[in-house]
Amino acid sequence: MAEESKEDRHNRELIELLNELRVALPGVQVLFAFLLAVPFANGFPKLGKLDRDIFFVAFIATALSTVLLIAPSSYHRLRWFVITDFLFHRAWAATFTAFIAACFLLLWYGLPLAGAIQDRRKPRRSR
């Protein structure tokens, strides 16, 4: 069997790492979803301050883990917008990638933040 080159070994190790991330990511996402629901459980208000602090640390650690595990995929997809880059010139790929990113920002963050700002400006009714 031929000995692999340094570049081939590097590529193989990177592929193995990405495969391991693909296995870990769904578990972290399920844990994060579970932790999002925990404060709404009936027993949560009965927890003491230390228990709530421990929960919050676990919640933040899981959120950061999710961000860090998804970042390589996001980087890859934004850096090489595969379908558009394959079908069209790189300039079109960059244009469509920027458009899609703007749509995500607008719909996921822009509209909710605008609604929250608008709600805060409304005078509150007294009961």
Image: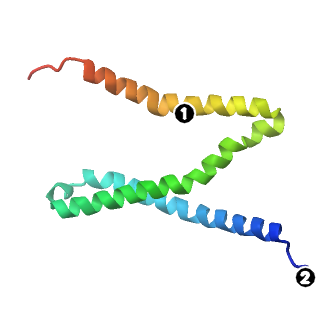
| Residue carrying label 1 | 104
Name the disc covering residue 1, or none.
Answer: 2
In the image, residue 1 above or below residue 15: below
Does residue 53 appear to the left or right of 33 in the view shown? Answer: left
**Residue sitting at 33 percent across and 27 percent down?**
116
Does residue 100 appear to the left or right of 90 in the view shown? Answer: left
Image quarter for residue 99?
A: top right
Task: Identify the image quadrant of the N terminus.
Answer: bottom right
Q: Secondary structure at mark 1?
A: helix
Q: How many marks?
A: 2
In the image, residue 40 above or below residue 108: below
Q: Position of residue 18 (x, y in %)?
A: 65, 62
Q: How is the image coloured?
A: rainbow
Q: Position of residue 83 (x, y in %)?
A: 76, 40
**Residue sitting at 21 percent across and 63 percent down?**
51
**Residue sitting at 71 percent across and 64 percent down?**
15
Does residue 109 appear to the left or right of 41 in the view shown? Answer: right
**Residue sitting at 47 percent across and 34 percent down?**
108
- Residue lying farthest to the bottom in this orientation: 1
Task: Identify the image quadrant of the C terminus.
Answer: top left
Mark 1–mark 2 Cα distance, whole angstroms, equals: 48 Å
Image quarter for residue 84?
A: top right
Image quarter for residue 114?
A: top left
Q: Position of residue 85 (x, y in %)?
A: 79, 38
- Residue lying farthest to the right in this orientation: 2
Which kind of residue does numbered mark 2 sit on? Met
The answer to whether the residue labelled 1 contacts the one labelled 2, judged by CB atoms less than 8 Å apart, is no
Mark 1, residues whose alpha carbon is within 10 Å: few (<14), some, or many (≥20)? few
In the image, residue 1 above or below residue 14: below
Residue 22 vs residue 5, the one in the foreground: 5
